[in-house]
Image: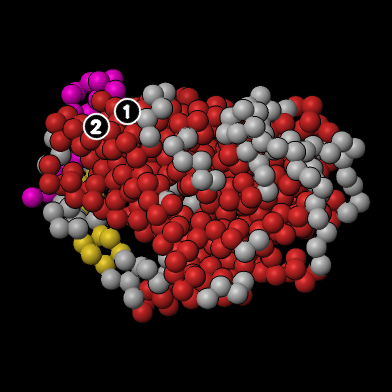
Amino acid sequence: MVWQQVYDPFGNMFISTALGAVPVVVMLAALGFFHIKAHIAAALGLVAALAIAIFAYGMPAGMAGNAALLGGLTGLLPIGWIVLNIIFLHQLTEQNGSFKILQDSIAGITQDRRLQLLLIAFAFGAFFEGAAGFGTPVAVTAAILIGLGFSPLAASGLSLIANTAPVAYGALGTPVITLAKVHGYDLMAVSAMIGRQLPFFSLLVPFWLIWAFAGRKAMWEIWPAILVTGASFAASQFFVSNYIGPELVDVIAAVVSMISLVSFLKIWQPKNIWTSVSLKGHEKDGGEGHVAPPPVVHPRADVIRAWTPWAILTVFVFIWGLPPVKAWFNGIFAPSFPISGLHNLIEKMPPVVKTPHKEAAVYTLNLLSATGTGILLSAIVGGLVMKYNPLQLVTQFFRTLWLVRYSLLTIVLMLALGTLTRFSGTDTTLGLAFANTGVFYPFFGTLMGWLGVALTGSDTASNVLFGGMQKVAAEQLGLSPNLMGAANSSGGVMGKMIDAQSIVVASTATRWFNHEGDILRYVFFHSIALACLVGLYVTLQAYVWPFTAMVVR
């Protein structure tokens, strides 16, 4: 029997919205304010979501359980699979000492921690976002930063802040392509529109990142390097998104940004070298931190060997992200399992969609094409290059699995919560609350995208969830549908730093277990502040600069 979603079960939008927010509030309060361990907080949020879905929204209990199951499976593959294997690679490089050589080689470019942060967290992270997405950039950059000596809070929080501007074009443009495909937007038009919103923030975020790390004065000391990093990324992002397409926006912009920064540092270095590895004002959070000793100069052959596992990782991740490669692997092995008692048994209803629409619930075991598999193979190849024997690799893999067991459990529970709220319609109730804001809709519609990513952990999922609603609301209010569809994705990128799975990925990569609440409290202000700035920018596009919302090619 088909169950139709109800978005205002009590005939009072205020009460329905309050109830719809309960699961998220329970989880975030437990995590951020009551200092409860992440897996327990996620379990509490899931229990609350089940209760609200079944007893308040009238969702059949069996459907609710199956939706949570589907989310849990998604948590294992692809998200958990990425986390496990990137930590596996990091462990291998630490065990044989090559990571120390890599650390020294980066310090050889610059010993200034602010510049290292620009290079690794922003530019290098953007490359991994563009090539793979789905948690990979935070896992990689946080692991590298902690290896470079950054305090756990700095490595975790700053990796999350840096991984914002590239998110809309992550995984070879998946969020934009999905938005266009699912909701009928013109792909190039919406890609160009996002490319007229995000470049401003691609320029702003590097400044914001260094300000968050070292303070305003320290930020202005290196403003030329920040400007080079951000401007080269922003200009490339604008050009590729408007004139080529969404697939390679981040990859090209990240490479241009990295080359520009490294080249600039050959002719310019700051007068004062910043050596602190802790956040300004948080020196005692996550350890005292330390001032790094001068880097050791290693032979070129040793440096090449130290970078080889990460170069192999880059190649594998990029290849695994290519659509033809994914399609080929999926043609070999990618069995699909419709979730019995859930698949095509739930209907989305207007005004979220124009006509009732059945929701598919299919779990695809795409193990071969999963990004985590590419990372695992790169770790194995890199391990063999580092002279590990097969037995040592297997032993270290299972040690890593034990190390991250609670993090994997947390990701499973959080994805179960997010999937249940999507199928029950509770997150749509929250979105509708934003949609009923009239003339302020460009601002709050942008925040709807932020909310979608904060709840689901994915800009792609947020676009699927709210992309249709943005189109309908924009047409009713006389706004550009492309503008608001793009705003959903652009606003969503700022929610990436507070979504639960990203926070768990960061805490796992830095091995700062049971401190997810500390990370959440630190990044929350940055997330909401940047999201509001995106909302204001979109509002200006809608009412003050309407010519920027016109796509001309």
Magenta span includes 118: no
x then y, percent, for residue 206 = 70, 40
What amino acid type should be assigned to the residue bearing mark 2?
Ala
Magenta residue span: 1-18
Contact between labelled residues 2 and 1, with CB atoms less than 8 Å apart: yes
What amino acid type should be assigned to the residue bearing mark 1?
Val
**Depth check: 69 or 275 in front?**
275
* Between discs 1 and 2, the one toward the N terminus: 1
- The disc at residue 184 is none
Q: Mark 1 — residue?
A: 26
Instruction: Note whether residue 22 is visible.
Output: yes
**Depth check: 529 or 389 in front?**
389
Q: Number of labelled discs?
A: 2
Q: Residue at x 38, y 34 (%)?
A: 37
- The disc at residue 48 is 2
Q: Residue at x 77, y 57 (%)?
A: 105
Tell me: residue 180, above or below residue 483: below
Magenta span includes 4: yes
x then y, percent, for residue 437 = 41, 24
x then y, percent, for residue 386 = 62, 71
Where is the C terminus found, in terms of image quarters?
bottom right
